[in-house]
């Protein structure tokens, strides 16, 4: 389903990270582990199509993502991938519920309000749905970001350091929820982190910066 | 969620900025509306008052003063002319109608004009209810505004004061009687009292004995003696009688070319064309109006720039949101539309506010200035020029969104959301 081949990732012509090979079947998860500066965020952004690979290819269901540019890449990503940014980027002018609907609206998909509410329920945010994100704790905002990544029922969810800012309890809870909602839509999960607390959740792990 | 709810959410989220931009825009629109409304109405009123008057004949002096005193009743006349001139002009085949005006007195600042019924006919003024026109001297018909301002009613009696403005000596010994009140005509008649021109002579002692039906006199040249008759001296009296001016209509278009020169060159009278003098006045006043209008448009443009600045800074704060929406798959055009709609919203509210405040302001100016300066200006009318204001405002609003909109296409999601 998801396939990476001889990927050289970076920007401004500078190679920051390499990923010689990765194949994920549907529903299969993977952890990209690396210290700060190992290029894991750059690599994750290349997988999501935010960055064009310097060399190599990223394919999904036979489509070459790395060949898409600009709004076509945005369009493909919105329909097939979910992304959780390290900086959560809440839209503070909108309520929690509208932050979710904004994803559907942006992608030009019908806004299924009930589904969005059910998702917030599942993430324990039902009573916060009319609050502005600024009124939420960091852990709650993290859950809103997860809900936004999953609301379009993507086939793959990419998370950039989803737990590194959280305490142990929240970390455990967020990881549990992330896996639950990923499973609920049958998606694969790729998490890039330096957080060793979550290595136990993944059977497949790639350590960046090493010669794998 | 749709483009409107999203726009409103963002406008609400920065309510203060939004309000300031709307106020700036509304200020510019208000100024334009005020200049436009007052200008249009004065022009309309000028042309209404000019209707049917091709030429004004009076004593030598300033042509503009003659027009301002005899057509608009704003200035004082420069002198008088012998009444017998009317017969000479009548004899001229180029002359159509002739209406004499004799000024001299006022009541509470409203001029009492000695004339013929033809003067009311000139503006198609109709009598209210059971009123009638004068049939003898010292009977007056009041203009609508004068009646409402002074509270005088049909049957009332009042004494005129000497002069054309308040405060002259009162002619208490010979009072006027109100016999009719005119419907409002939107012309100078509204604030005048009309009477037989002989009344003015009677009061000023020129012709105490000959007060009669002006219509009869003008049509037939006959004279009916009244109570105070001293009949036999008609001719001698005629020589001494004076009036202020004559309003003339041409009998043929050719008259416009010949008659003014003929009068100005071969008589001791002054002939002035109202339309020419008003056009000349407009050339002077027009410059002032143009400057006001330019300042107003400058303010609207400034407001456009401030919409732009407001949107630009909002866009700067919002580049994360816009990048985020791009990452969620929003096409750049969708985001551009969002910005344009937001800008149009501000322009629309500014426009609506400006139009409402502008009309209100003109209405306030109209009620106060109308008392002081005898000009009718209302805020409760619309003009075609305002349609252009709507178009211009929305175009400015749309343009203000353009530069921020161009930035939407240049957003680099990775640099904005990941690298920061």
Image (cartoon, coloured by chain):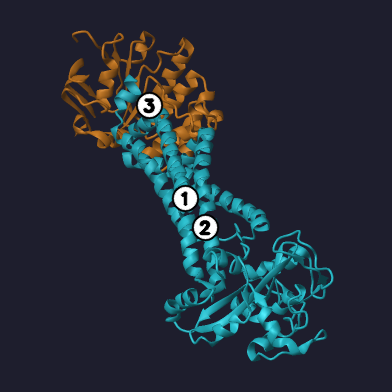
Disc 2 from disc 1: Cα separation: 10 Å
Quadrant in which the C terminus of chain B appears: top left
At which x and y percent is residue B291? 46, 49
- Chain A painted colour: orange
Label pair 1/3, CB-CB below 8 angstroms:
no
- Disc 3 is attached to a residue of which chain? A
**Badge 3 element:** helix
Residue B12, percent from left and from top: 52, 36
Viewer-nearest residue: A193 or B194: B194
Q: Residue B39 got which mark?
A: 2
The crowd level at tag 1 (other Cα within 10 Å; few <14, some 14-19, many 20+) is some
In the image, the chain rendered in cyan is B
Q: Nearer the viewer, residue B19 or B148?
A: B148
Q: Which residue is mark 3?
A: A182
Q: Report whether residue B333 is seen.
A: yes
Residue A146: quarter of image: top left
- Residue at 69% over, 63% down: B164
């Amino acid at each position: 389903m998801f396939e990476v081949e001889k990927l050289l990732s970076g920007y401004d012509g500078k190679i920051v990270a390499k990923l010689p090979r990765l194949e994920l079947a549907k529903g299969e998860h993977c952890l990209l582990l690396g210290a700060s500066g190992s290029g894991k965020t750059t690599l994750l952004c290349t997988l999501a199509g935010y960055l064009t690979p310097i060399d190599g290819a990223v394919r999904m269901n036979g489509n070459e993502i790395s060949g898409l540019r600009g709004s076509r890449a945005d369009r493909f990503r919105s329909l097939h991938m979910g992304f959780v940014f390290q900086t959560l980027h809440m839209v503070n002018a909108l309520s929690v519920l509208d932050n979710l609907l904004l994803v559907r609206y942006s992608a030009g998909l019908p806004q299924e309000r009930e589904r969005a509410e059910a998702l917030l329920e599942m993430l324990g945010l039902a009573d916060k749905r009319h609050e502005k994100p600024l009124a939420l704790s960091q852990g709650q905002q993290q859950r809103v970001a997860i809900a936004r990544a999953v609301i379009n029922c993507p086939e793959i969810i990419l998370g950039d350091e989803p737990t590194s800012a959280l305490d142990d309890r929240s970390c455990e809870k967020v990881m549990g929820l992330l896996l639950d909602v990923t499973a609920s839509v049958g998606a694969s999960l790729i998490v890039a982190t330096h957080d060793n607390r979550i290595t136990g959740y993944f059977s497949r792990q790639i350590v960046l910066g090493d010669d794998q | 969620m749709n483009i409107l709810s999203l726009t409103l959410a963002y406008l609400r989220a920065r309510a203060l900025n939004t309000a300031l931009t709307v106020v700036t825009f509304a200020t510019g629109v208000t100024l334009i509306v005020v200049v436009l409304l007052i200008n249009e109405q004065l022009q309309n009123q000028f042309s209404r008052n000019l209707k049917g008057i091709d030429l004004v004949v009076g004593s030598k002096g300033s042509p503009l003063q003659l027009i301002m005193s005899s057509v608009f009743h704003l200035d004082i006349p420069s002198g008088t002319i012998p009444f017998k001139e009317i017969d000479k002009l009548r004899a001229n085949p180029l002359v159509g109608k002739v209406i004499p005006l004799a000024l001299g007195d006022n009541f509470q600042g409203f001029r009492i004009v000695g004339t013929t019924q033809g003067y009311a006919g000139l503006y198609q003024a109709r009598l209210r209810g059971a009123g009638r026109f004068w049939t003898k001297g010292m009977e007056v018909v009041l203009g609508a505004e004068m009646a409402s301002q002074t509270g005088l009613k049909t049957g009332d009696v009042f004494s005129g004061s000497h002069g054309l403005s308040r405060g002259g000596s009162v002619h208490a010994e010979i009072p006027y009687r109100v016999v009719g009140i005119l419907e409002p005509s939107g012309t100078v008649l509204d604030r005048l009292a009309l009477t037989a021109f002989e009344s003015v002579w009677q009061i000023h002692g020129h012709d105490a004995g000959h007060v009669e039906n002006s219509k009869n006199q003008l049509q037939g040249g006959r004279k009916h003696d009244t109570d105070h008759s001293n009949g036999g001296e008609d001719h001698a009296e005629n020589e001494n009688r004076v009036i202020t001016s004559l309003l003339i209509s041409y009998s043929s278009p050719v008259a416009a070319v010949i008659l003014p020169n003929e009068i100005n060159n071969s008589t001791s009278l002054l002939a002035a064309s109202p339309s020419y003098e008003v056009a000349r006045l407009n050339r002077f006043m027009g410059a002032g109006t143009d400057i006001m209008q330019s300042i107003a448009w400058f303010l609207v443009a400034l407001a456009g720039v401030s919409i732009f600045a407001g949107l630009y800074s909002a866009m700067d704060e919002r580049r994360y949101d816009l990048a985020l929406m791009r990452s969620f798959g929003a096409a750049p055009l969708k985001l551009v539309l969002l910005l344009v709609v937001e800008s149009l919203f501000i322009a629309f509210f500014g426009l609506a506010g400006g139009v409402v405040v502008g009309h209100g302001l003109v209405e306030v100016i109209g009620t106060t200035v109308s008392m002081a300066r005898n000009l009718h200006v209302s805020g409760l009318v619309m003009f075609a020029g305002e349609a252009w204001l709507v178009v211009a405002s929305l175009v400015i609003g749309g343009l203000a969104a353009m530069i921020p909109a161009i930035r939407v296409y240049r957003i680099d999601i990775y640099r904005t959301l990941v690298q920061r």
